[in-house]
Amino acid sequence: MSEINRQWEKLEPIVRSLPDNPGVYQYFDEHGTIIYVGKAKNLKKRVSSYFRNDASIYGKVRVMVRKIFEIRYLVVDTELDALLLENNLIKEYQPRYNILLKDDKTYPWICIRKEPFPRIGPTRNRVNDGSEYFGPYASGKMMNMILDLIRHIYPLRTCSLNLDRQHIDKGN
């Protein structure tokens, strides 16, 4: 019996109980460490695909499957929600078998700066400075369309001058 078949026997009840909904799944090793995070539009189909015993499952995946001790999942409303959640979890936990999305790239956000005369603009880095952040957006193009709409409707500050009380009092 192959190692994948042994893993399937052990994890089959969990996999069969997964919903047919979009979501994010997490594989844990025997030490409770997340080794992989994935997204799916159908959790049951996607997770069960790892346990097929055919040539389409290549070396790295076979090794990972042998190490799965526990499977957890989170159901979300849409495939886009799953994509964004997967991105955040990979960045937070840096699972060993996730190669993509481990880098420092992240999804764009709209930021309203905490300033006396707030500016609004795009960012990819959320900073804990009291500013308000809206997003993340799966597409920079979509975020820019929303920013253009906001700027068209509301006359907002576009300059980057320092408009704190001291500079205004000095006439700067």
Image (cartoon, helix red, strand yellow):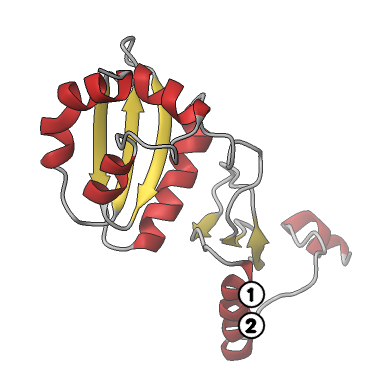
The image quadrant where one finds the N terminus is top left
The structure residue drawn at horizontal position 61% and vertical position 76%, both measured from the top left corner, is: 147
Q: Which residue is mark 2?
A: 148
Q: Is residue 125 above or below residue 165?
A: above
Where is residue 47, by image quadrant? top left
Query: Residue 111, percent across and down?
Result: 59, 60
Residue found at the very far top of the displayed protein: 31
Residue depicted at x 31% and y 39%: 25
Badge 1 is on which residue? 144
Q: Position of residue 36 (x, y in %)?
A: 42, 31
Using the rendered image of the protein, determine whether residue 16 is visible from the camera's viewpoint. yes
Q: Secondary structure at mark 2?
A: helix
Q: Amino acid at mark 1?
A: Asn
Residue 153 percent across, percent down from the top left: 57, 90
Q: CB under 8 Å between callouts 1 and 2?
A: yes
Amino acid type shown at disc 2 = Asp
For the residue carrying disc 2, how many other residues have a C-alpha within 10 Å: few (<14), some (14-19), or many (20+)? Answer: few
Secondary structure at numbered mark 1: helix
Query: Which quadrant does the C terminus fall into?
Result: bottom right
The image quadrant that residue 18 belongs to is top left
**Which of these two is toward me, 144 or 35?**
35
